[in-house]
Amino acid sequence: MLSYLSKYIAGIYRQSKIDINQQFQSLGLKATEGDLLLFLHDNPGLSQKKVAVLMVLDPSLIGRDIQHLIKLDYVVRRPSETDSRVNLVYLTPLGEQLVQNLRQILTQWWTTLFAETATADQTETGVQLEQLYDTIIRRNL
């Protein structure tokens, strides 16, 4: 069973990105940009480097997405008060509004998947995935 977990997680991830990306594209976003907006909503005022570590993504990819989101007026960078060499990333009011739409899209996708999988418990699955994610993050810090 454990040897198949990567296959299952990767398959769920890929299919979610295919389905969700279509909806995010209608809002002018790539799936990774939508993920970034949602993350920034929950974690405002982090450096680009910290965002990359916590999202388990390459910092250069985050940089391109942040630049695009700045152009769309969804994100701003502000200098850190403690270290002027570091810029912190925040959502704009327009970005905050968009996050609500993104949450609805994701919630609907997961609600549908769990409804079609009668034996899966969304609360228990969510808790367990969060614990696994936290372990990965602790390793990367």
Image (cartoon, rainbow, N blue to C red):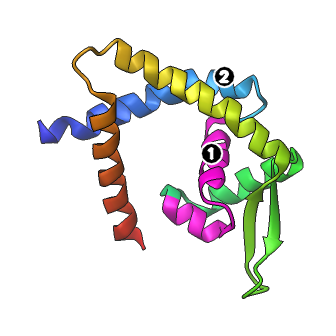
> Mark 2 or mark 1, which has the lower sequence index?
2
Question: Which residue: 50% across, 61% down?
Answer: 54
Label 2 residue SS:
helix
Q: Of the numbered discs in the image, which one, if any, rests on residue 136?
A: none
Q: Is residue 63 left or right of residue 112?
A: right
Whole-percent x, y for residue 108 in the image: 53, 21
In the rendered view, would you say 10 is above or below 68? above
Whole-percent x, y for residue 89 in the image: 73, 63
Which residue bears the numbered disc 1? 38
Whole-percent x, y for residue 139 in the image: 34, 69
Q: Is residue 71 left or right of residue 106?
A: right
Position of the N terminus by quadrant: top left
Count up the numbered dots.
2
In the rendered view, would you say 136 is above or below 74? below
The kind of secondary structure the magenta stretch mainly shows is helix
Whole-percent x, y for residue 97 in the image: 78, 38
- The magenta region covers 30-54
Specify whether residue 51 is painted magenta: yes
In the rendered view, would you say 129 is above or below 134? above
Question: Which residue: 34% across, 11% down?
Answer: 116
Specify whether residue 114 is painted magenta: no
For the residue carrying disc 1, how many other residues have a C-alpha within 10 Å: few (<14), some (14-19), or many (20+)? some
Quadrant of res 78: bottom right
| Three-letter residue code for mark 2 | Gln
Which residue bears the numbered disc 2? 23
| Three-letter residue code for mark 1 | Leu
Question: Which residue: 36% across, 49% down?
Answer: 130
Q: CA distance from mark 2 to mark 1?
A: 15 Å
Label 1 residue SS:
helix
* Residue that sits furthest to the front in the current view: 123
